[in-house]
Image (cartoon, rainbow, N blue to C red):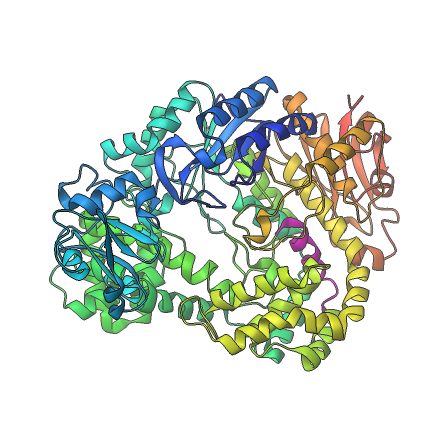
Amino acid sequence: MTSRSTPSSTYRLQLRPEFGFRDAERVVGYLEALGVGAVYLSPVLDATPGSTHGYDVTDPTKARPELGGEEGRLALAGAARAGGMGLVVDIVPNHMSVEVPSANPWWWSVLLDGAESPFAHHFDIDWSRERILVPVLGSAEDVAALAVEGDELVYYDHRFPISGSTEGTPQEVHDRQHYELVDWHRGNTELSYRRFFDVTTLAAVTVERPDVFDDVHREVLRWVADGDVTGLRVDHPDGLADPTAYVQRLREAAPDAWIVIEKILHPGERLPGSWPVDGTTGYDALGEVSGVLLDPAGETVLTQLAERLGVPTDYAAVEEQARRLITDSILVAEVRRIAGLLRDVEVDAAREAVAETMIAFGVYRSYLPEAGDEWSRAIDRATARRPDLSGALAALDEQVRGNPDGELATRIQQTSGMVVAKGTEDTTFYRFTRFAALNEVGGSPDRWGIDVEDFHRLAAARDADAPATMTTLTTHDTKRSEDTRARMAVLAEVADEFAELVTGWHERCGIDEPSLDLLAWQTLVGAWPISDERLSDYLLKAAKESKLRTTWTEPDEDFEQAVAAWPARVRAELGDEVQAFVDRITPAGWSNSLSAKLLQLAGPGVPDVYQGTELWDFSLVDPDNRRAVDYDLRRELLDRFGEGLVPDLDLSGAAKMLLVHRVLTLRRDRPELFAGYTPLRASGPAAEHAIAFARSADLIAVATRLPIGLERRGGWDTTSLSLPEGRWTDVITGAEVDGGEVAVADVLARYPAALLVKGDAS
């Protein structure tokens, strides 16, 4: 579907206390000049004090005061409207933060009054348990550290409400409350409320209840009704009890809004047909664009390198092991709660059957009764792996299918996404590091890219089926930025050289954990030059996420110290060699970056530009990708473009920004050009290095793939592309070519990517 408020493009801004509504308002003029169709904001409702991302919402009834509150929100909305742009807001319906209870009035009420609270059913709490388990103590003995201050129970910086009398010792007062403060270790095994993934400070919200839906969405929907918000981005729909009913209710409440959902689609997976949304947040497009620029010839060499360094290369085995770790040690409470709903099956068998089924999912989750194929495949796969559980699995299958709207079916489906996300994205992606550029949200690291024909087929399908879906190359959740990924893709073209270098570097400065070691070398060259501090922070996060030598909860301090010291050690011992190698591959990385950006921006869908990535941006996973953006520099460059500057392809990144500016502006000013999709094929000796398509009779995009291979063969030579007769102008550079059989070398004389419009580009 295509909503009335579908923007021509979006630009993502990460709001935080240091960059609030007023700061965003000051950027609106620049975004308008850049060509942006809508300002796209991270969550703006009140959140945990000091939050740098906003996904930890504490009060959905008001704009976040730390960002500037209602006054600031209205000023930003007015500025966007005056600039002819829409305003898209990220909403978080699945969970709320309970980290600081006093900041969340609903949670405070529940802790104070228990099941009698008017908000008792706003959270997914197991009320069959006597008290709400709150895992906050450092150890069981820490209950002795409790104190009573006024009408609050205090544990160091944590404060909780007191119901009833404050007489007696703090422990006695605590024992009379509707909640029980326990050792944080018990959270994974005994938690009495559903959480977001394994984060006990994020409690799940029951938006499947109409009254809760209304309370959670009332303020945001008021903004939509007032015309201040034109689009909604829905976070983590797979965690909801009934995603189908949710998006249907949201569409009914916001009939004209552009609605996209953060649904992670496995390659080949499609959104349920009953979902009245405009599309996803674009990870599927990310995988396709990155995949078509990847050299398949590098797979064997880089697989051999991984094996030589001791990195596992059996992806399925690594993924299964990682997911099993999640069900068996991290999401134990969730598995136990689901298994308790399975009738007529012995307790241990029920738990194992539930865990095995979630481990076996090929996608994030199923959506019974509408789409049952993925559920069937998961049951079949689980049964093949564990024939000893065939009886329990058959009972699970029968009971889930027999009542697809029941609690058992609901909970196992909404929890499978947690197992996949934590087991695959947050564990496997840091263990299976054969080629980290493939380890991206929505990606399958065991699939080595896609060919040109598949790229065209998928793009045409997007144009036909979901023309208003979002497309992206970088988000706040990607494992690395688009430019880092684009340079890393070059490694597949120089696989022999890279493998030889890494083998030697490893012997001199290797990290004593193979998966992290190989990831570190790829990251080093992909993000170079990178500060020691940024690289240390990234590698420590990667090490903890892999859960091999250290974890967030059980750190190996000696290992972490060695990892933290690694960047400085490498810079001192190998810095010149790393610099020399990066210098050789950097131009090819630039080529990949410009080509990827053109394929995304000119292709089907609504393209999003993540903050700052209009220039080179070699960021890594969050929080690295939330660093401040220099908008003064970008404004200055934009002014120079208006004066006629067509920059060289160089370290400044200005060429990328020019491409972004020109393509976004054309999309906004001449949307009729971006309709339809027709693959075009070059002819000649280097035809495989060109990827081209027409969006309409008057618009053609041409990009370069495998630039190292192109250079090795001596360039484009006589490779040509057939254009309709007439004069064509490259929107990016202003260069003109005549139609007919045109040399690709002429079309791409200045940059490795061109967007040709029939006649005058203005």
Residue 730 lies in what quarter of the image? top right
Q: Please indicate whether residue 118 sits to the left or right of residue 233 in the image.
A: left
Instruction: Tell me where residue 518 appears, x and y as whole percent.
Output: 62, 71
The residue drawn where x is 55% and y is 51% is 478
Q: Main secondary structure of the magenta part?
A: helix
499 sits to left or right of 199: right
Residue 28: quarter of image: top right
Does the rendering let one see residue 60? yes
Q: Is residue 60 above or below residue 124?
A: above
Which residue appears at 27% of the width and 55% of the height? 154
* Magenta residues (range): 481-495
Q: Is residue 466 left or right of residue 376?
A: right
Q: Indicate whether 429 appears above or below 33.
A: below
Name the one closer to the observer, 107 or 732: 107
Residue 698 location, x and y as percent? 72, 25
Relative vertical location of residue 124 with respect to residue 134 in this rendering, above or below: above
In the rendering, at what x and y percent does residue 234 appear?
42, 38
- Was residue 588 drawn as part of the magenta stretch in this picture? no
Measuring from the top left, give residue 294's x and y in whole percent: 67, 56
User: In the image, is residue 489 part of the stretch drawn in magenta?
Assistant: yes
- For this view, does 114 lie left or right of residue 754? left
> Which residue is found at the position 46% from the left and 48% from the top?
265
Say which quadrant the C terminus sits in.
top right
Report the residue that reaches farthest toward the bottom.
507
Question: How many numbered marks, from 0 up?
Answer: 0
